[in-house]
Image (cartoon, helix red, strand yellow):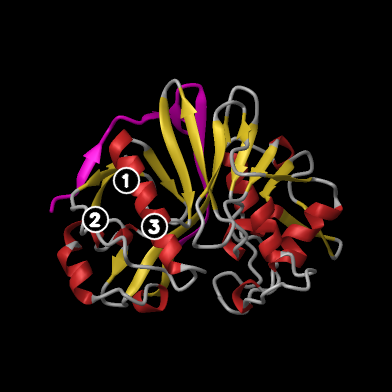
Amino acid sequence: MMLRHAMDVNRCGCGLRLGLVEITRVEDYQGPGLKSTGMFPDFRPEMWQAQKDWLVPAFYDPQEDRIRTSIHSWLVRTPHHTILIDSCIGNHKERPVDPRFHMRNEPWIERLARAGAKPEDIDFVMCTHFHADHVGWNTRLENGRWVPSFPNAKYLFTKKEFARWDDRRPDYVHRESERFIFADSVLPVVEAGQMELVDEGYTLDDAMTVEAAYGHTPGHIKIRLRTDGGHALFCGDVIHHPIQLPYPKVYSVFDDDPVQALQTRLDVLDNCAAHGILLLPTHFAEPYLCRIDSVGTAQEPSYMPIWQR
Protein backbone atom coordinates (compact mmCIF):
# COMPACT_ATOMS: atom_id res chain seq x y z
CA MET A 1 0.00 0.00 0.00
CA MET A 2 1.39 3.36 -0.99
CA LEU A 3 2.06 6.14 1.49
CA ARG A 4 -0.59 8.79 1.21
CA HIS A 5 -0.14 12.51 1.74
CA ALA A 6 -2.46 15.46 2.07
CA MET A 7 -1.70 19.16 1.97
CA ASP A 8 -4.87 20.55 3.52
CA VAL A 9 -3.37 21.75 6.81
CA ASN A 10 -2.70 25.47 6.77
CA ARG A 11 0.95 25.82 7.77
CA CYS A 12 2.23 29.05 9.24
CA GLY A 13 5.56 30.23 10.59
CA CYS A 14 4.82 28.79 14.02
CA GLY A 15 3.59 25.37 12.86
CA LEU A 16 0.03 24.88 11.69
CA ARG A 17 -3.19 26.83 11.92
CA LEU A 18 -6.79 25.69 12.30
CA GLY A 19 -8.93 28.77 11.97
CA LEU A 20 -7.73 31.23 14.61
CA VAL A 21 -5.88 28.55 16.59
CA GLU A 22 -2.13 28.03 16.11
CA ILE A 23 -0.47 24.72 17.01
CA THR A 24 3.26 24.11 17.34
CA ARG A 25 5.14 20.94 18.20
CA VAL A 26 7.86 21.38 20.87
CA GLU A 27 10.27 18.44 20.82
CA ASP A 28 11.96 16.92 23.85
CA TYR A 29 13.27 13.71 22.22
CA GLN A 30 13.34 12.09 18.81
CA GLY A 31 15.20 8.91 17.96
CA PRO A 32 15.37 5.20 18.76
CA GLY A 33 12.88 3.86 21.24
CA LEU A 34 12.46 0.42 22.74
CA LYS A 35 12.89 -2.89 20.95
CA SER A 36 9.75 -3.78 19.01
CA THR A 37 8.41 -6.51 21.29
CA GLY A 38 9.78 -4.69 24.33
CA MET A 39 7.20 -2.01 23.58
CA PHE A 40 4.57 -4.04 21.73
CA PRO A 41 4.45 -7.73 22.78
CA ASP A 42 2.30 -8.66 19.76
CA PHE A 43 4.61 -7.00 17.21
CA ARG A 44 5.59 -9.54 14.52
CA PRO A 45 8.11 -9.27 11.65
CA GLU A 46 5.43 -9.76 9.01
CA MET A 47 3.73 -6.59 10.21
CA TRP A 48 6.58 -4.26 9.36
CA GLN A 49 7.31 -6.26 6.21
CA ALA A 50 3.77 -5.65 4.97
CA GLN A 51 4.04 -1.92 5.73
CA LYS A 52 7.75 -1.34 5.04
CA ASP A 53 7.20 1.03 2.09
CA TRP A 54 6.09 3.71 4.57
CA LEU A 55 7.05 2.37 7.99
CA VAL A 56 10.81 1.92 7.31
CA PRO A 57 13.02 3.78 8.12
CA ALA A 58 10.98 6.74 9.42
CA PHE A 59 9.14 4.81 12.13
CA TYR A 60 10.98 1.49 12.50
CA ASP A 61 14.58 0.31 12.19
CA PRO A 62 14.53 -3.41 11.28
CA GLN A 63 18.32 -3.79 11.59
CA GLU A 64 18.23 -2.70 15.22
CA ASP A 65 14.65 -3.91 15.74
CA ARG A 66 13.82 -0.59 17.36
CA ILE A 67 10.82 1.61 16.93
CA ARG A 68 11.52 5.26 16.19
CA THR A 69 9.66 7.73 18.31
CA SER A 70 9.21 11.37 19.18
CA ILE A 71 8.33 12.82 22.57
CA HIS A 72 6.87 16.28 22.22
CA SER A 73 4.46 18.82 23.62
CA TRP A 74 1.79 20.62 21.64
CA LEU A 75 1.74 24.38 22.12
CA VAL A 76 -1.74 25.69 21.34
CA ARG A 77 -2.53 29.39 21.00
CA THR A 78 -6.16 30.38 20.87
CA PRO A 79 -7.27 34.03 20.57
CA HIS A 80 -7.51 34.06 24.38
CA HIS A 81 -4.89 31.74 25.89
CA THR A 82 -1.61 29.92 25.42
CA ILE A 83 -1.93 26.24 26.33
CA LEU A 84 0.63 23.45 26.66
CA ILE A 85 -0.55 19.87 26.09
CA ASP A 86 1.74 17.29 27.74
CA SER A 87 5.03 18.46 29.17
CA CYS A 88 7.38 15.68 28.06
CA ILE A 89 10.31 14.33 30.08
CA GLY A 90 11.90 17.21 31.94
CA ASN A 91 15.45 17.71 33.23
CA HIS A 92 17.38 16.45 36.24
CA LYS A 93 14.76 13.83 37.11
CA GLU A 94 15.47 10.39 38.49
CA ARG A 95 14.13 7.90 35.97
CA PRO A 96 16.41 4.87 36.38
CA VAL A 97 14.04 2.52 34.55
CA ASP A 98 14.64 4.33 31.22
CA PRO A 99 18.11 5.79 30.50
CA ARG A 100 16.63 8.15 27.90
CA PHE A 101 14.69 9.89 30.66
CA HIS A 102 17.21 9.73 33.51
CA MET A 103 18.92 12.91 34.76
CA ARG A 104 18.64 14.74 31.46
CA ASN A 105 19.84 18.25 30.67
CA GLU A 106 18.12 19.19 27.42
CA PRO A 107 17.22 22.61 25.93
CA TRP A 108 13.46 22.10 25.83
CA ILE A 109 12.82 25.56 27.32
CA GLU A 110 14.86 27.07 24.48
CA ARG A 111 12.81 25.08 21.97
CA LEU A 112 9.66 26.40 23.59
CA ALA A 113 11.04 29.93 23.12
CA ARG A 114 11.74 29.22 19.45
CA ALA A 115 8.10 28.14 19.19
CA GLY A 116 7.19 31.61 20.44
CA ALA A 117 6.45 31.16 24.15
CA LYS A 118 8.34 31.71 27.39
CA PRO A 119 7.39 29.69 30.50
CA GLU A 120 5.60 32.69 31.98
CA ASP A 121 3.46 32.96 28.83
CA ILE A 122 1.73 29.64 29.43
CA ASP A 123 -1.80 30.10 30.77
CA PHE A 124 -2.81 26.43 31.05
CA VAL A 125 -1.03 23.08 31.15
CA MET A 126 -3.09 20.03 30.21
CA CYS A 127 -1.65 16.53 30.71
CA THR A 128 -3.32 13.60 28.96
CA HIS A 129 -2.01 11.35 31.74
CA PHE A 130 0.69 11.16 34.40
CA HIS A 131 3.38 8.97 32.84
CA ALA A 132 6.95 10.25 33.11
CA ASP A 133 7.18 11.48 29.51
CA HIS A 134 4.00 13.56 29.77
CA VAL A 135 4.50 15.49 33.02
CA GLY A 136 8.27 16.04 33.29
CA TRP A 137 8.42 19.73 32.42
CA ASN A 138 5.57 20.48 34.79
CA THR A 139 8.39 21.37 37.18
CA ARG A 140 12.02 22.41 37.17
CA LEU A 141 14.75 22.21 39.77
CA GLU A 142 15.46 25.53 41.52
CA ASN A 143 17.88 25.71 44.45
CA GLY A 144 17.35 22.04 45.16
CA ARG A 145 13.54 22.25 45.07
CA TRP A 146 11.03 21.29 42.44
CA VAL A 147 8.94 24.30 41.44
CA PRO A 148 6.33 24.76 38.67
CA SER A 149 8.02 25.54 35.36
CA PHE A 150 5.14 27.77 34.28
CA PRO A 151 4.62 30.29 37.08
CA ASN A 152 1.43 31.86 35.72
CA ALA A 153 -0.27 28.67 34.55
CA LYS A 154 -3.17 26.70 35.87
CA TYR A 155 -2.44 22.99 35.57
CA LEU A 156 -5.64 21.18 34.58
CA PHE A 157 -5.61 17.57 35.80
CA THR A 158 -8.57 15.21 35.76
CA LYS A 159 -9.75 13.93 39.11
CA LYS A 160 -9.52 10.29 38.05
CA GLU A 161 -5.92 10.49 36.80
CA PHE A 162 -4.80 12.50 39.82
CA ALA A 163 -6.32 9.89 42.15
CA ARG A 164 -4.53 7.06 40.31
CA TRP A 165 -1.06 8.52 40.87
CA ASP A 166 -1.45 10.17 44.26
CA ASP A 167 1.03 8.05 46.19
CA ARG A 168 -0.22 9.50 49.48
CA ARG A 169 -3.38 7.41 49.18
CA PRO A 170 -3.55 4.15 51.15
CA ASP A 171 -4.83 2.34 48.04
CA TYR A 172 -2.02 3.59 45.79
CA VAL A 173 -0.73 0.90 43.42
CA HIS A 174 3.02 1.22 42.83
CA ARG A 175 4.46 1.13 39.31
CA GLU A 176 8.23 1.18 39.15
CA SER A 177 8.48 3.05 35.84
CA GLU A 178 6.54 5.95 37.38
CA ARG A 179 8.16 5.77 40.80
CA PHE A 180 9.08 9.44 41.24
CA ILE A 181 6.55 11.25 39.06
CA PHE A 182 4.07 12.36 41.69
CA ALA A 183 6.71 13.72 44.06
CA ASP A 184 8.75 15.65 41.49
CA SER A 185 6.25 16.56 38.77
CA VAL A 186 2.77 16.77 40.30
CA LEU A 187 2.93 17.44 44.05
CA PRO A 188 4.98 20.67 43.66
CA VAL A 189 2.20 22.02 41.43
CA VAL A 190 -0.36 21.16 44.11
CA GLU A 191 1.72 22.80 46.83
CA ALA A 192 2.10 25.96 44.73
CA GLY A 193 -1.69 26.26 44.44
CA GLN A 194 -1.59 25.99 40.64
CA MET A 195 -3.55 22.76 40.18
CA GLU A 196 -7.19 22.72 39.10
CA LEU A 197 -8.95 19.35 39.09
CA VAL A 198 -11.51 18.99 36.31
CA ASP A 199 -13.95 16.39 35.06
CA GLU A 200 -14.29 14.94 31.60
CA GLY A 201 -16.40 17.35 29.58
CA TYR A 202 -14.48 20.42 30.78
CA THR A 203 -14.09 22.91 27.92
CA LEU A 204 -11.47 25.63 27.61
CA ASP A 205 -12.04 28.70 25.43
CA ASP A 206 -15.17 27.10 23.93
CA ALA A 207 -12.76 25.15 21.74
CA MET A 208 -10.83 22.47 23.64
CA THR A 209 -12.78 19.74 25.40
CA VAL A 210 -11.44 17.10 27.79
CA GLU A 211 -12.81 13.65 26.94
CA ALA A 212 -12.34 10.25 28.59
CA ALA A 213 -9.89 7.93 26.81
CA TYR A 214 -9.33 5.25 29.42
CA GLY A 215 -7.21 2.13 29.16
CA HIS A 216 -3.62 3.29 28.87
CA THR A 217 -4.14 4.68 32.37
CA PRO A 218 -7.39 4.72 34.38
CA GLY A 219 -7.84 8.47 33.88
CA HIS A 220 -6.23 9.00 30.48
CA ILE A 221 -7.89 11.73 28.42
CA LYS A 222 -7.94 12.99 24.87
CA ILE A 223 -8.43 16.66 24.05
CA ARG A 224 -10.74 17.63 21.20
CA LEU A 225 -10.21 20.92 19.40
CA ARG A 226 -13.04 22.38 17.33
CA THR A 227 -12.58 25.60 15.41
CA ASP A 228 -14.16 27.28 12.42
CA GLY A 229 -11.07 26.18 10.52
CA GLY A 230 -11.01 22.52 11.44
CA HIS A 231 -11.33 19.68 13.93
CA ALA A 232 -8.35 18.05 15.66
CA LEU A 233 -7.75 15.48 18.38
CA PHE A 234 -4.78 15.38 20.76
CA CYS A 235 -4.75 11.68 21.61
CA GLY A 236 -1.85 11.30 24.06
CA ASP A 237 -0.97 7.61 24.32
CA VAL A 238 -4.22 6.21 22.97
CA ILE A 239 -1.97 5.53 19.97
CA HIS A 240 1.77 5.31 20.57
CA HIS A 241 3.10 4.44 17.14
CA PRO A 242 1.94 4.27 13.50
CA ILE A 243 2.11 0.44 13.54
CA GLN A 244 -1.09 0.63 15.61
CA LEU A 245 -2.96 2.11 12.65
CA PRO A 246 -2.93 -0.93 10.33
CA TYR A 247 -2.78 -3.18 13.40
CA PRO A 248 -4.83 -1.49 16.15
CA LYS A 249 -4.83 -4.67 18.26
CA VAL A 250 -1.11 -4.18 18.90
CA TYR A 251 -0.97 -2.99 22.49
CA SER A 252 1.68 -1.32 24.60
CA VAL A 253 3.34 -2.89 27.64
CA PHE A 254 2.52 0.38 29.40
CA ASP A 255 -1.25 -0.02 28.95
CA ASP A 256 -2.88 -0.53 32.34
CA ASP A 257 -5.89 -2.20 30.73
CA PRO A 258 -5.09 -3.44 27.19
CA VAL A 259 -8.68 -4.47 26.49
CA GLN A 260 -10.09 -1.06 27.36
CA ALA A 261 -7.16 0.65 25.62
CA LEU A 262 -7.98 -1.22 22.40
CA GLN A 263 -11.62 -0.16 22.49
CA THR A 264 -10.58 3.44 23.11
CA ARG A 265 -8.11 3.27 20.22
CA LEU A 266 -10.74 1.87 17.84
CA ASP A 267 -13.23 4.53 18.90
CA VAL A 268 -10.68 7.29 18.24
CA LEU A 269 -9.63 5.90 14.87
CA ASP A 270 -13.22 5.35 13.74
CA ASN A 271 -14.12 8.88 14.81
CA CYS A 272 -11.15 10.41 12.99
CA ALA A 273 -11.75 8.38 9.82
CA ALA A 274 -15.48 9.13 9.72
CA HIS A 275 -15.13 12.89 10.21
CA GLY A 276 -11.76 13.78 8.67
CA ILE A 277 -10.35 14.75 12.06
CA LEU A 278 -6.68 15.69 12.29
CA LEU A 279 -4.90 13.34 14.72
CA LEU A 280 -2.07 14.80 16.82
CA PRO A 281 -0.31 12.03 18.76
CA THR A 282 2.48 12.64 21.26
CA HIS A 283 4.95 10.06 19.96
CA PHE A 284 4.73 9.83 16.17
CA ALA A 285 8.01 10.66 14.45
CA GLU A 286 8.10 13.03 11.48
CA PRO A 287 5.72 14.17 9.98
CA TYR A 288 4.07 13.81 13.43
CA LEU A 289 0.39 14.22 12.54
CA CYS A 290 -2.08 12.66 10.16
CA ARG A 291 -5.63 12.08 9.15
CA ILE A 292 -7.01 8.56 9.16
CA ASP A 293 -8.36 6.35 6.39
CA SER A 294 -10.31 3.21 7.32
CA VAL A 295 -9.21 0.29 5.12
CA GLY A 296 -10.40 -2.71 7.13
CA THR A 297 -13.70 -4.34 7.99
CA ALA A 298 -15.94 -4.35 11.03
CA GLN A 299 -14.52 -7.78 11.90
CA GLU A 300 -10.89 -6.81 11.26
CA PRO A 301 -10.49 -3.04 11.62
CA SER A 302 -7.45 -1.52 9.99
CA TYR A 303 -6.46 2.05 9.19
CA MET A 304 -3.84 3.95 7.24
CA PRO A 305 -2.30 7.37 7.87
CA ILE A 306 -2.84 10.25 5.49
CA TRP A 307 0.22 12.28 6.45
CA GLN A 308 -0.02 16.04 6.82
CA ARG A 309 3.22 17.68 5.68
Q: Main secondary structure of the magenta part?
A: strand
Residue 228 placement, left or right of 2: right
Q: Earlier in the sequence, mark 2 or mark 1?
A: 1
Residue 164 placement, left or right of 254: right
Q: Earlier in the sequence, mark 3 or mark 1?
A: 3
Which element carries disc 3, helix, strand or loop? helix
How far apart are labels 3 and 1 at the CA level? 10 Å
Which element carries disc 2, helix, strand or loop? loop
User: In the rendering, which numbered label is found on residue 270?
Assistant: 1
Front position in the image: 293 or 114? 293
Q: Which residue is mark 3?
A: 263
Which element carries disc 1, helix, strand or loop? helix
Are the residues tagged 2 and 1 within 8 Å (C-beta)? Answer: yes
Q: Is residue 43 visible?
A: yes
Residue that extends furthest to the front in the rendered view of this protein: 299
How far apart are labels 2 and 3 at the CA level? 11 Å
Residue 43 in the magenta stretch? The answer is no
Are the residues tagged 2 and 3 within 8 Å (C-beta)? Answer: no
**Tag 3: residue type?**
Gln
Q: Which residue is mark 2?
A: 301
Give the class, few, some or many, for how many residues have Cα within 10 Å of label 2's Cα (few <14, many ≥20).
some
**Tag 1: residue type?**
Asp
Are the residues tagged 3 and 1 within 8 Å (C-beta)? Answer: no
Horizontal and vertical percent for residue 101?
59, 69
How far apart are labels 2 and 1 at the CA level? 9 Å
Residue 18 in the magenta stretch? The answer is yes
Give the class, few, some or many, for how many residues have Cα within 10 Å of label 3's Cα (few <14, many ≥20).
some
Q: Is residue 36 above or below residue 283?
A: below
Which region shows up in magenta? Answer: 1-30
Q: Earlier in the sequence, mark 2 or mark 3?
A: 3
Q: Is residue 97 above or below residue 130?
A: below
